[in-house]
């Protein structure tokens, strides 16, 4: 739930300004779009403000696809609710246990203080008749508090160990949530998050960003002929090939089924095409051998589509052009690479994205 720490008058001003801006930009007036522009004008979401300023400085249209992308990026974050709930509950239990131990230690400390006061009174009054008993009482209280302190120290050590374990569990769960279980590379969710981050960096720095969409040719036929285990082997082989050819800041991901994607920050269309050809060739030259029957199953090939991000465009369009290029590669006979530029050549009426360096961000204060 989004919380707004603003006065009623300020909220009314922002609401009116948001509706006016939406009307000026031709944005459809519905709650999700209103949320975007209300928060933009409030200045309480710096990343959103920066993104919209960049889009406006590049004269981008705020159509429904663009607005949906903005809402998803900034207001529709998927939370791992079960993970957070479990970790929170475990932490609450650990802290409650520590507080209980500390509370008990506080009671024993009071008892120790009373024993010490009585002993001091005996010494001050020079009443040595009950000194032995006073010493025994003080010694007993001292041993009690030492025991409590040791218990507290042990409990705190145990709690520290448990919290460290919970933190490792949380990190492992996050990693698993972002990893494809069959191949060990990034999954679709990790791809979506990484692509958004890279698009933001691209708009901020003016550096290019490219995308490869890769599909295994005739995979269904291969899977039906040789079985699902052989099909899984091919998918793992494809992931291994990508890992061997994609380095550093680039991200390889399983996009879904037999489709894969590679995000290439700071890479233009030409270099992205070269890498795509390199990947295609490496896949083509590898033989698939059955791990069960130890016999050669032949080879597989891939088709690859390549696109480059146009600053400020919705990510859906960026992905769509790579998908169209992939479709073109398939249509031309498979086992080949096609780029968005070839789509424009094949369909002269198609618009080529305007890939220009974004203008410096305009500073705006609410």
Image: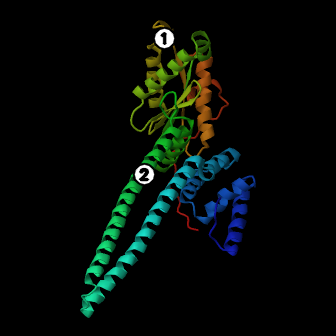
Element assignment for label 2: helix
Q: Residue at x 53, y 19 (%)?
A: 302
Judged from this view, the residue extending furthest toward the right is 29
Residue depicted at x 54% and y 60% = 46
Which quadrant of the rendered structure holds the C terminus? bottom right
Q: Residues within 10 Å of mark 2 (few under 14, many from 20)?
A: some
How many marks the image carries: the answer is: 2
Secondary element type, mark 1: loop
Locate residue 48: give its quadrant: bottom right
Q: CA distance from mark 1 to mark 2?
A: 43 Å
Front in this rendered view, residue 150 or 67? 150
Find residue 190 and report its horizontal and vertical position in percent.
53, 39
Q: Earlier in the sequence, mark 1 or mark 2?
A: 2
Which numbered marker is on residue 292? 1
The mark found on residue 99 in the picture is: none
Residue 264 appears in the rendering? yes
Relative to 200, residue 340 above or below: above
x and y percentages locating residue 164 in the rendered image: 41, 51
Neighbour tally class for label 1: few under 14, some 14-19, many 20 plus, Cα within 10 Å: few
Q: Is residue 20 above or below residue 357?
A: below
Q: Residue furthest front?
A: 129
| Residue 6 position in % (x across, y down) | 64, 71
- 265 or 221, which lies in front? 221
Q: Is residue 309 left or right of residue 240?
A: right
* Residue under label 2: 162
Which residue is at a point 43% across and 74% down the rendered structure image? 107
Q: Quadrant of the N terminus?
A: bottom right
Task: Say whether residue 142 is left or right of residue 67.
Answer: left
Depth check, mark 1 against mark 2: the one in front is 2
Q: Position of residue 205 (x, y in %)?
A: 46, 48
Measured along the vertical axis of the image, is residue 175 above or below residue 131?
above
């Amino acid at each position: 739930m989004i919380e707004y720490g603003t006065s009623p008058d300020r909220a009314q001003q922002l609401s009116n300004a948001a509706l006016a801006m939406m009307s000026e930009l031709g944005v459809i007036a519905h709650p999700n779009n209103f949320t975007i522009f209300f928060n933009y004008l409030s200045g309480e979401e710096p990343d959103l403000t920066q993104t919209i300023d960049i889009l406006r400085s590049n004269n981008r249209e705020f159509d429904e696809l663009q607005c949906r992308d903005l809402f998803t990026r900034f207001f529709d974050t998927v939370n791992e609710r079960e993970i957070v709930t479990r970790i929170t509950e475990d932490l609450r239990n650990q802290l409650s246990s520590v507080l209980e131990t500390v509370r008990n230690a506080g009671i024993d400390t009071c008892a120790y203080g009373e024993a010490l006061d009585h002993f001091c009174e005996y010494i001050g009054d020079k009443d040595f008749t009950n000194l032995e008993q006073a010493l025994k009482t003080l010694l007993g209280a001292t041993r009690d508090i030492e025991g409590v302190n040791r218990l507290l120290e042990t409990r705190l050590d145990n709690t520290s160990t448990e919290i460290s374990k919970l933190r490792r569990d949380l990190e492992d769960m996050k990693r698993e949530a972002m990893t494809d279980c069959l191949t060990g590379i990034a999954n679709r969710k990790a791809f979506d998050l990484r692509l958004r981050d890279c698009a933001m960096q691209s708009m901020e720095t003016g550096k290019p960003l490219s995308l490869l969409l890769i599909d295994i040719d005739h995979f269904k036929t291969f899977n039906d002929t040789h079985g699902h285990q052989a099909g899984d082997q091919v998918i793992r082989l494809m992931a291994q090939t990508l890992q061997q050819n994609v380095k550093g800041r680039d991200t390889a991901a399983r996009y879904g089924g037999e489709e894969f994607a590679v995000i290439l920050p700071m890479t233009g269309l030409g270099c992205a095409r070269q890498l795509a050809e390199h990947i295609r060739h490496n896949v083509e030259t590898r033989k698939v051998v059955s791990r069960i029957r130890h016999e050669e199953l032949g080879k597989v090939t891939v088709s690859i589509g390549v696109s480059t991000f146009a600053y400020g465009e919705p990510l859906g369009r960026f992905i769509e052009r790579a998908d169209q290029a992939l479709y073109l590669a398939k249509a031309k006979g498979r086992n080949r690479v096609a780029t968005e530029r070839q789509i424009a050549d094949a369909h002269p009426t198609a618009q080529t994205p305007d890939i220009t360096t974004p203008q410096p961000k305009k500073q705006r204060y609410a």
